[in-house]
Every structure is written in structure tokens, then in C-alpha cells.
Image (cartoon, coloured by chain):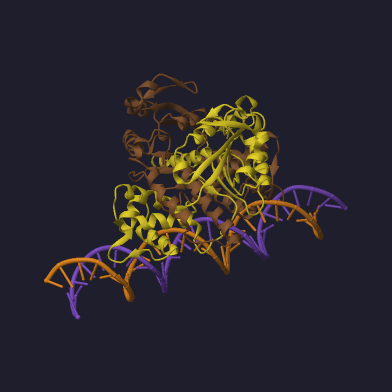
Chain colours: A brown, B yellow, C orange, D purple
DNA sequence: CCATCTTTGTGCACGCGTTCACAAAGGCAT
DNA sequence: ATGCCTTTGTGAACGCGTGCACAAAGATGG
């Protein structure tokens, strides 16, 4: 999973474990699919299979929400959709701003998953004056100068950062100062935020590196090859040669 | 974090805990930045701050790799960069294919972080015949028919899925059948894969929902408002109304 | 109304991950 | 060479998350 919680070490919110909260959207998605097919009830076993988890874990997760099941029958799909939606806070609209409208920012703006879960793109913001006014996904891009005004007038509490790494912390600071208390960070940087602000990060580069680790392990188990080969040393040395200048001046979205 | 490990419950590979592996890329990034500034050594305290973790955790993480530090001094930056790169398997080139060249796929293709860490985009693949031959990020898009051929002739073991949810499992099956053993999934679906295949997922919708949960909790603690308000019920009911048809036929990338 | 059968909800145990706290180790100054 | 000072490496304790296994609960059929 490309996700990583940053701060908030192990805060069990209102008795619901963090690990459970992270799975609720998964259950909700599976339940929504069942709801569309007009399935009235579902057993923990079936739903767990659809969500890709263990049925015992699913039952324990639901037990934190309350006793919404019926023994011998299962769970009422519609009721559970409502309960989970409510628990996740999806019963209200969340205005969201996306900062950094490069390739990735544009992809996010076009992402259909926003609107369908109570998230509304309130504004697209970019530092490039040439972008200002240009519509992306039907929404005109606004200049960074407007950031504070946009946040405050729309009551935005969730911000998405899709800028290059060099700009991320600065953007983050401005978002927080303007009142944003939850940030989804796509820039490959560690963001520092005050207490009370949640940060979640999505980092493609890290995901790939984790996959490479397991891939290497799988390959190494058979061929038994290990240790620094000459080629390996060469590549390692070239790693730094690739990276010129500070993080900020790489034009592409999300430099590593 | 937008990341979630899927299968592989708790396999401690060669003695290195999974949680440690997930942090190694973070350390590597911080170390690379230090290396660029020609910093010769760094203490666990400094590096931990740069990586956004606890110094004790960092030292324990490094202890799994071996004793690469010098007491009273710290760690040699260059040496550590090499050791972590080697451990993560970044000392070799990993050809990667990206399947699904929509908004997101194009953003990924343009992502600078690929090349700088030993990942090479071997091919871009899309099901739309109109896309075939069109260059994206300097690489011509190829049709899905070529998938097996591309995988085998390039020795690709890592695949990135950026298709709509409805196509993801099918693409996944074909990738695995052709020899791919690690998959990074951006489509909002649970992928089923045989043993030995690693799947990591990046799911924007889930991340936002987790943020919304905490955001609601923060808001609720002050205003003490709880329970299903009429407005809440309205929204919950409209959740399903938004979602027409099966997952597959939503045109946008990554429907939720 | 009773027996049976299905499925939930959870007590319990186990293992991973995190953190504390400190002894061991090495550099450095004198 | 010796003592001091810094920083590593790790033993031990703790807490969270997971999974097992079963008792309680309720539906269903006779």
C-alpha cells in the first residue's frame, strides 16, 4: 500500500483502532457494490472475501461500531453502508483544494472518486501564472496568491499537495496557516506540521522500492547470488550522479 | 499513508522486518540529500529528524542491516547510501511497464522518480487502439495485445496498473501469467493473485476517507454534535445514487 | 414451543513493532 | 596512555493488531 500515516503515533480515536479505520473504506466499497446489485444482506464471510480480508477481522472491526449484524443471517447491506458512511464522516461534503496542477494534479482533478464520496474539489491552485484561468477538469486554475482567500471563504479543511518536493513544505505551511487541518501529500518530502494536523502521504517511489526489495529477495533465493557485484557498485554510484541540484528545481511532478 | 500491503501477512524476509523495509526508502532519500551537500557523516538523531522518525527506531532499523555506524561519531553517509541501495535491490535496473495510460498513467510515465532509482519504464500499454503509437513522456504507447510479448522480451517483473477498476483484475491476471511477480495497483479494486506475487495498492479514495474520519472527529470533539442529522441521511442516500453501473464502465481513471 | 442450524460477537493468546534506557565502544583532548 | 564525552547497538517491557475458537443469539422448520 502506497499509504503511510505520518504523525499521530497510535491515537485510538473514540475507541476505533486506526487499523480498523483504514479498512472501513474497503468494506464500504464492497458494500456499495452489493447495494447496487440490490443484495439485501451479506455474511461476514462473503463480505470479507469481497474486501480481501479475514472474516474474523471484519467481525471484530464491525464490533467497534456496534452490533449491527443479526446472528444466523448476517449484516443488512443498506444499513451498514449508512453506518460506515456516517462513521467515516462521508455524510457531509468535504471541500478539497488541490495545489500543484502538473500531470499528477490534473489526474487527481479528473479523478471520479472525489465527487462520489462527498469530496468536492473546491479549487485548483498552481504557482505558474500561465496556468491561471485555464480550466482543468472543468475547474479554472487559480494562482497561489489566492490560496488563503480560497481556503477561508470555502471553509476548506482538507488539502492535497501535488507540487514538486521543493515547494511542498512551503505550501503546507500556508495551507495550515489558512486553516487546513488534514493534508494528503503526494510530494516526496517529509512534511512538518503542528499538532492537530493530520498528514497522510502517498509516495510512488517508496512503493516501488519496497516492491524491488521483495523482488530481489525472490530472485536471490533461487540463484543464491549475493553481495556487491561490480555492476551493483556502478549503479549505486550513479544514483547520486542522477540527482542534480536541490529537490525544488526538477520540473517533473513528484521528483524522488 | 496511501499505501497498503495486501497479501504476505507477516513474512519477515531474511530477518528484516517489513516495517523496517518500508522505512529504508525514507532514510535513503534523506541520505541522498546529505550526500549531495557532501556531508560526510550523520548521527542517528540528525538523520532521524530528516526522515521524520524516532532516532531509536532508526538505530534499530539499521541494526538489522548490520553495524554500519561508529560510536561517538555516527554513520558514514556514502557507505550507508550504498548499503541501503543494495539491500533494497536498487543496484540493478528494474524494467517496469505501466498499463492504462489515462490521466494517471501519463502522470506516472512522466514521473521523474522512476529513472533516478533504478526503475526504467520499459513500455506503456493501453487498451485504446487510438492511443497506440502516440508518444507519452517520449515513449510510444503500445496496445494491450502486445502485453505478453513486451513482458517476456524485456524480462519485466514489476507492473503498474493504472486502468479503471473494471479492467484491473483482468490486466493483473495477464501480467502475472506473463511473468510479472510484483504489482503496484492504482485501481480501486481488491486484486487476487497467486502466492509468490506481491501486490501493493495506492488508493486515493481510501486516503481521503481516512482523513475525513479524523477531520470529523476533530470537529465533533468541540461542537459535540453527533448522530444522524437529516442532512446526513440525505447525503448517505445520495451515495448510491451517484454510482451507476458496475465499476468497469466509469470513464475516468480510478473511479471509487 | 422446541430443536436445530447458521452466523455473529468476543475472550484469549500470540507475534510484531515501538520505545525506553543503558552498557559497550570508540574518538578526542590532555 | 588515560579519562571523558558522545553516540551506537540492543535487551527488555509494553501495546497494538491479528487470528483462533467458541459460546451466545437468533432465525427457521417441524
User: Which is nearer the eye, B195 or A59?
Assistant: B195
A118 and B252: which is toward the camera = B252
- Residue at position x 52%, y 54% from top? A213
| Image quarter of residue C24 | bottom left
Is residue A104 visible in the rendered structure shown here?
yes
Q: Position of residue A157 (x, y in %)?
A: 40, 34
Q: Is residue B24 left or right of residue B190?
A: left
In this rendering, the answer to whether B13 lies above or below A99 is below
Task: Tell me: residue A80, above or below residue C7.
Answer: above
Q: Position of residue B50 (x, y in %)?
A: 33, 50
Where is the C terminus of chain A found, in terms of image quarters?
top left
Q: Does residue B65 appear left or right of residue A41 in this picture?
A: left
Position of residue B215 measured from the top left corner of the image (x, y, whole percent): 43, 40
The mark tally for this picture is 0
Residue B223 in sight in this render: no
Looking at the image, which residue sits at the far top?
A133
Q: In terms of depth relative to the viewer, which is nearer, B167 or A174?
A: B167
Q: Is residue A129 left or right of residue B15?
A: left
Measured from the top left, where is residue B126 in percent x and y? 61, 32
Q: Residue at x 40, y 19 (%)?
A: A133
* Frontmost residue, B67 versus A67: B67
- Most distant residue in the front direction: A230
Amino acid at each position: 500500500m502506497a499509504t503511510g500515516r505520518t504523525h499521530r503515533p497510535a491515537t485510538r480515536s473514540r475507541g476505533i483502532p486506526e487499523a480498523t479505520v483504514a479498512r472501513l473504506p474497503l468494506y464500504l466499497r464492497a458494500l456499495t457494490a452489493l447495494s447496487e446489485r440490490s443484495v439485501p444482506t451479506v455474511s461476514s464471510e462473503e463480505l470479507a472475501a469481497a474486501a480481501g480480508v479475514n472474516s474474523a477481522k471484519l467481525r471484530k472491526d464491525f464490533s467497534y461500531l456496534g452490533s449491527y449484524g443479526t446472528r444466523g443471517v448476517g449484516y443488512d447491506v443498506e444499513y451498514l453502508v449508512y453506518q460506515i458512511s456516517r462513521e467515516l464522516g462521508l455524510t457531509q461534503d468535504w471541500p478539497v483544494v488541490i495545489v500543484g496542477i502538473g500531470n499528477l494534479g490534473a489526474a487527481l482533478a479528473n479523478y471520479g472518486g472525489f465527487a462520489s464520496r462527498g469530496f468536492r474539489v473546491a479549487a485548483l491552485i498552481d504557482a505558474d501564472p500561465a496556468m491561471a484561468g485555464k480550466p482543468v477538469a472543468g475547474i479554472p486554475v487559480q494562482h497561489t496568491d489566492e490560496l488563503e482567500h480560497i481556503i477561508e471563504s470555502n471553509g476548506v479543511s482538507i488539502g492535497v499537495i501535488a507540487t514538486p518536493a521543493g515547494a511542498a513544505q512551503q505550501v503546507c505551511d500556508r495551507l495550515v496557516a489558512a486553516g487546513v487541518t488534514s493534508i494528503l501529500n503526494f510530494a516526496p518530502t517529509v512534511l512538518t506540521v503542528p499538532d492537530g494536523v493530520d498528514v497522510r502521504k502517498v509516495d510512488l517511489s517508496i512503493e516501488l522500492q519496497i516492491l524491488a526489495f521483495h523482488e530481489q529477495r525472490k530472485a536471490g533465493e533461487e540463484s543464491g547470488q549475493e553481495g556487491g557485484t561490480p555492476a551493483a557498485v556502478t549503479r549505486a554510484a550513479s544514483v547520486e550522479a542522477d540527482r542534480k541540484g536541490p529537490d525544488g528545481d526538477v520540473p517533473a511532478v513528484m521528483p524522488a
